Amino acid sequence: MIIEDIMSKNFAVYPSLLEKTVFVTGGALGIGAEIVTAFAKQGSKVGFLDLDLDASKKLAKKLGDNVHFEICDLTNISAMQTSMKNLKKLIGSADILINNAANDDRHDWKDVTEDYWDERLSTNLRHQFFAIQHVAPEMIKKGGGSIINIGSNSWWEAGGGFPAYTTAKSAVHGLTRTMARDLGQHRIRVNTVVPGWIMTDRQKKLWVTPEALENQQKRQCLPDLIEPVYVARMVLFLASDDASMCTANNYMVEAGSI
């Protein structure tokens, strides 16, 4: 049934992902939910972290017994580590880590305080490193793994209106490069997936307008709007054995946006 569902959309099936253990941060909604769903349909065991209890319950119920979740605030590193330990008890240690959680709330540079700056970096960057630090020792014992950090095309495009967010997201690429070097000797691959403007429900609710869509489509080489599923498909590839020689790089899913 899973394979039939994937094939009906002409998407790839990755045998190397069957029964693999996957941890996803920010997995209840948006891109994260699409990533959780994609791995579940590959037959992976998936554990995700999120703050939204109702959305987490709904997604886990929809996807079945191989999907579990923990509710935690990722800015609280100790709580995140405890939640990951709880997931390990349920589905085993991570073969694959997807650092997805983020928040792109807009803010004017003139209004940013020290506390807000620190909160934005905690929300969009700090937990990625500590999640890697937490899962890497077990990956080393297993002889390898795949870590995928979700970046953003916003800073590549010199996007304005959220400087703390774009600063954090640009730093994700540095984190990927240095951790790929440090962990590569253990056959742990670390990559960044770089989404463009993805049409999640949150984006549609808060920022999608006819004018904004028109401007975005002018910036893209491809005319189609980008759905979350296409980010998930790139993540699956990088997590699979098909990408065994891919590390320390950025993989863009932005329709050629400039």
Image: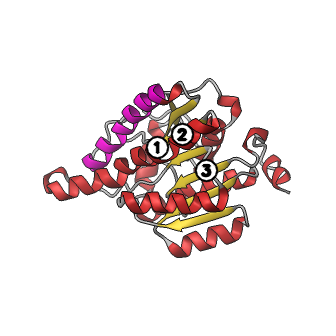
Q: Are marks 1 and 2 in contact (CB under 8 Å)?
A: yes
Left/right placement of residue 106 relative to residue 63 reads left
Upstream in the sequence, badge 1 or badge 2?
A: 1
- The residue shown at (18%, 58%) is 115
- Give, as a three-letter code, the residue at label 1: Ile
Q: Quadrant of residue 153?
A: top left
Location of residue 238 in the rendering, given as x and y in whole percent from the top left corner? 62, 35
Which residue carries the number 2 mark?
147
Asked if 249 appears above or below 158 in the picture, the reply is: above
**Residue 243 or 183: which is nearer the viewer?**
183
- Residue at coordinates 44% horizontally, 37% vertically from top-left? 219
Q: Which residues are magenta?
A: 161-182
- Residue 93 - label: 3
Q: Magenta span has 23?
A: no
**Closer-to-camera residue (75/139):** 139
In the picture, measured across the screen, residue 27 lies left or right of residue 79, that is right
**Observer able to see residue 27:** no
Circle 2 — which element? strand
**Closest to the observer: 219 or 106?**
106
Check the picture and name the quadrant holding the C terminus: top left
